[in-house]
Image (tube, helix red, strand yellow):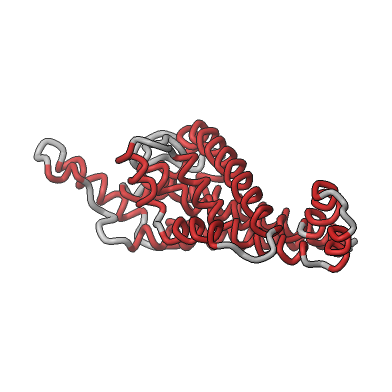
Amino acid sequence: MKPAVSVAAWLARTLAIVLLVITGSTLLVRCAPGYLSDAREMDARYADAARGELNAEAARSGSLPHLLFSEVGGWMRGDAGLSRQYGVPVFELIRPRLAVTGRLLLRALILAWSLALCAALLSSASRSPSLFWHTPAALLLAMPTAAMATLCLLTDHGGPVLVMALLLAARDFKFLHHALRRAWLDPHVLQARAQGIRMRRILVAHILPAAAQQLSALLSLSIVTALSALVPVEVIFNVPGLGQLAWNAAMNRDLPVLLAATMIMAIAVTFAGMASDRHSGWRNA
């Protein structure tokens, strides 16, 4: 019975998050200055047609409940509505970009965890904390994502994967260092080191299992951090992914596309949190 209750609670939480995303995004976009404006109004050839379209849209979006019902109806039909900017079903725009964003996130997460875990293992195993490891992480944490991406473009070195990996590695290193440091200072680990047991065996048998719960929670946080950095990285590097699509939708007030992109990100964060909670529950059991 307990698994069924857990699944029901997760479904309820996911549904609540999706409803909040739909309502919040719709309200923010609809109330944004210039929502009912179009660059074509500045051109005499298209001004009358543009004003007619904007008046029709103003009539449709006059009330928030009606606007929400219209957007949800697009999801019920299976196409998530029509893009205001491109005039095609939203899923046709999102489907090819999901693969691009997925590959970018996967490569960045693998590289970031490789860098952070190696650095944390070396720094945590030393007798005392060293500034040699913590100073680069602090400098990377202090640098905005957009500034880091712009620097890569100006120097013609690096790319979107490297920028996201460095950003994630700097954040993950702090948590990994503290988690592994506590594991290295456990009495049985100190006794094993004193007896001359090989470091590789200690690492595999004691250090990593002791920090497994913290690592699973940190993985969920890494996914959230990667999603937050997705938009500036894809926009600056001109990566045709979901983040760039969300940015263009926000700039052009394309509500159906913006809702679809934010819902996908919200569901991804929810799944990551559920996986972390499930792993913690297994560990505690």
In depth, the one of 92 and 141 nearer the eye is 141
Residue 232 is left or right of residue 11, and the answer is: left
Residue 253 is left or right of residue 34, and the answer is: right
In depth, the one of 1 and 158 nearer the eye is 158
Residue 129: quadrant of the picture? bottom right
In the rendered view, tell whether residue 186 sits above or below residue 227. below
Please tell me which residue is depicted at 49% across the width and 54% down the height of the picture.
228
Residue 81 is left or right of residue 280, and the answer is: left
In the rendered view, tell whether residue 73 sits above or below residue 82. below
In depth, the one of 69 and 20 nearer the eye is 20
Across and down, in percent, residue 136 comes to: 49, 56
In depth, the one of 226 and 247 nearer the eye is 226
Please tell me which residue is depicted at 87% across the width and 54% down the height of the picture.
196
Q: Is residue 247 visible?
A: yes
Q: Is residue 10 visible?
A: no
Across and down, in percent, residue 183 comes to: 77, 63
- Quarter of the picture holding the N terminus: bottom right
Across and down, in percent, residue 206 comes to: 84, 56
Please tell me which residue is depicted at 84% across the width and 58% down the height of the picture.
193
Residue 238: quadrant of the picture? top left
